[in-house]
Every structure is written in C-alpha cells, then in structure tokens.
Amino acid sequence: DRDFTLRWAPDVQHQPQATLFTERFEEKHYALLMVMPPQQVTDAIRLPREAIFILDTSGSMGGASIRQAKAALETALSRLQSRDRFNIIEFNSHARRFFTESVAASPTRIDQAMSAVHRLQANGGTHMAPAIEMALTGAPPQGYLRQVIFITDGAVGDERALFELVRRRLGGARLFTVGIGAAPNSFFMREAALAGRGTFTHIGSVAEVQRRMGELFEKLEYPVLADIELHWPDGVRVENWPDVYPDLYQGEPVLVAAQLDQLAGALSVEGIS
C-alpha cells in the first residue's frame, strides 16, 4: 500500500562482461541481456564528454530546492576533467546560456561558472521548451559524447510538443532528467529520458538532492560504451525493450529484455568506446 525503492549493485568482480538469461514460457522464448562495465574505468578508456546542465530557476525552486540544486551543480563542475567541455543553461520565464557555446573545462572557465551559479536566484515562470531546444542545438564537438542534465521541480505542461522537440533535436545527445519534490510530471521526465538514451532520477526529499545528484554525476563521469547495437541471429524474430539502448557507464549494467520465436545462433553486442 505504499511505494518502495529497491537498490542493488552487481558484483562486477566475478561477472563476465555480458550475460544472457533465457526462459521458455507458453511456447515462447524470453531473454534478458545484461552487459556489464569493466570493474575499474580509467581516464584512458573513458569517452570525452560535453556536459550541458539545464537548471530550473523558476519561482517554485525557491528556498531549499535552489540551494541544494546549486550546491550539487557546483560539485559537478568541480569534478569535470580537463578534456571535458561544458555549458550551463538556466531557465524560468526565459532561457539563458552561461557561454555562447560549450567551453573546455579549464580552471578559469570553471571558476567563472561557479561564480555565476552562486549568484542564481529563483523567480519567474517555468518555460522549458526554449532551454531544451538551446541545449540540443548544433552537434557536439567531434569525438565527444553530449550529456544534457535537466534539473527541475516544476510540473511539465504540453507534453506532446516537448516529446516532439526532444525526438526532433536529440541527434547524438543523451538526455538525463532530474525531478525534485512531488510536483514534477514523472511520466514525461521518464519517457523523455528513455527517448534520450538517458535516465530519470526522482528525488522526493529536498534533503536528498545533493547526495542523489552526486551519485548521478559520478556515474556520468565515466561513459564506457556508447551507441550500443545488438545484432540478433539471422532468421530470428525478436521484440525487445528498450528499442533504443542506453550507454554503458561504470557501476551500472545495461539491461535489455526480449521475446524471441526461437533460441538459435549467436547474439553480438557492439558500441563505440
């Protein structure tokens, strides 16, 4: 009669890089694919990334919400690596970039961003579309994985238009949504993250914002495998979910469930590392 949270972690030390579990039920075959990251991911094998942070600074974010979100964002900035790039977009009634385009994560640029984040105040309305469009405009630098982290506590209106905007402008970017408190439209944010090859993080208590966002940022720092493709055996009819695969990150496996008409042949997994 209440919600619960199940948290688990794979024992990566004793697991192969990929495992396929199968089951037959009522004349149909089902499979669960688990792709595991390496036990330790070093800077030498992580993909360089372009991190674009979208922060809701509307009036509803006032008080503890904006303070916690700003502190978490400052933590994320301090963890950027020298070969990463970043930008920050704040939105309320209007959207504004900190830099005209993403910049290298140099100490000077990070200090500039820290000072600007510290000065942010919560006021105005909640107009999301301009900020999302701004973040997804243009292509990321060659060889970089673009990660868009969208942080809000506001209710999402006009879902259909926003879904269409994400699908139309996403390109090679990844969209990670973060909802703070009880107000966010969790359906939209979950589905938008799924379409964006990202994840949705719901933080019900303001007291957990910095810890939970710290966990998210730590994961995003180490992308291991991007643009994952599954090649099922020829002649096998397959329905799988999700049909757009997320990237592989340190400490988090990729899970794909499938229904097959037969179990035959070999499944291969490919991606960019």
Image: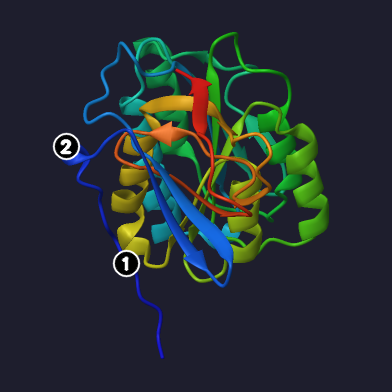
Residue 155: x %, y % from top left: 64, 64
Amino acid type at mark 1: Leu
Amino acid type at mark 2: Gln
> Residue 63 falls in which quadrant of the image?
bottom left
Residue 47: x %, y % from top left: 43, 18
In the image: residue 95, left or right of residue 16: right
Q: Is residue 130 above or below residue 123?
A: above
Q: Is any atom of residue 194 visible in this view?
A: yes
Q: Nearer the viewer, mark 1 or mark 2?
A: 2
Q: Residue furthest bottom?
A: 1
Q: Which residue is mark 2?
A: 13
Residue sitting at x 54%, y 59%: 29
Please count the marks in the image.
2
Residue sitting at x 62%, y 29%: 173
Of the image marks 1 and 2, the number of the one nearer the N terminus: 1
In the image: residue 114, left or right of residue 89: left
